[in-house]
Amino acid sequence: MLEQLMELVREHAQSTVVNNPAVPNEQNEAVIGAATESIASGLQQELANGNTEGVLSLLGGQSATGATQDNPVVGNISNNFVGTLLEKFNLDKGAATQLAASLIPTVLGSLVNKTNDPSNSSFNLNNIFSSLTGGAANGIDLQGVLGKLSGGLDKNGDGKVDLSDLTSLFSNGASQQQQGGNDAGGGIGGMLKNLLG
């Protein structure tokens, strides 16, 4: 999944990264890699924190705010990317904020569109969740779960569907993936290093 995500970031990085005078040309690939890592690790962090419903509704295209800066998941990922741009690439805060506010929602919007396009097999909900949770989503029909979320499992009318079992499963899987990432260069950061060479 990470390779496809990096290609997606690359597709949308021309104006925001490559043609951006605030980003030195020799840092273009590193910024693209950092954006990819911010998206993947941000989604993984949301799952680890128990926000299965937020990630599902974002990627499943069920969120009212979609992949915009107003979506809390997108906002968290954008904010983390701004921090990376400030810390690793020494961009000024205005340039970093503008770059993140333009690139992250655009890439996530494209990811949502591709994930929900039945004729596009490069991304699907189960593969994304399995990749982020170390396989915890294997064998679960996430499209079916998403249909139930939007189709009215809310029997008591409180606006919530009880996803506690699924949330726990994904949270544990994502947490274990993150811990694996801290040991011996594994996880999303390690996979990105392999992709970037």
Image (spheres, rainbow, N blue to C red):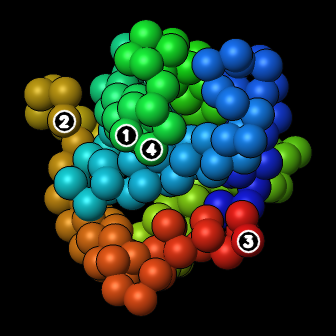
Mark 2 or 3, nearer chain start: 2
Mark-to-mark CA distance, 2 and 3: 44 Å
Q: Is mark 1 in CB contact (under 8 Å) with mark 2?
A: no
SS class, disc 3: loop
SS class, disc 2: loop
Mark-to-mark CA distance, 1 and 3: 22 Å
Q: Tell me if residue 131 can be seen.
A: yes
- In the rendering, at what x and y percent does residue 65 appear? 43, 16
Q: Which residue is mark 4?
A: 88
Location of residue 94 by image quarter: top left
Q: Is mark 1 in CB contact (under 8 Å) with mark 4?
A: yes
Residue at image point 34% right, 71% down: 178
Mark 1 or 3, nearer chain start: 1
Q: Is mark 4 in CB contact (under 8 Å) with mark 2?
A: no
Judged left or right of residue 9, residue 74 is left
Q: Which residue is mark 1?
A: 87
Amino acid type of the residue tagged 1 in the rendering: Glu
- In the rendering, at what x and y percent does residue 22 appear? 62, 19
Q: In the image, which is nearer the foreground, mark 1 or mark 2?
A: 1
- In the rendering, at what x and y percent does residue 26 appear? 74, 41
Q: Which residue is mark 3?
A: 197
Amino acid type of the residue tagged 4 in the rendering: Lys
Q: Which residue is mark 2?
A: 160
Amino acid type of the residue tagged 2 in the rendering: Lys
Query: Crowding at label 3, few (<14), some or many (≥20) Cα neighbours within 10 Å?
Result: few
- In the rendering, at what x and y percent does residue 193 appear? 61, 70
Residue at image point 37% right, 40% down: 87
Location of residue 197 by image quarter: bottom right
Query: Crowding at label 2, few (<14), some or many (≥20) Cα neighbours within 10 Å?
Result: few
Q: How many tags in the picture?
A: 4
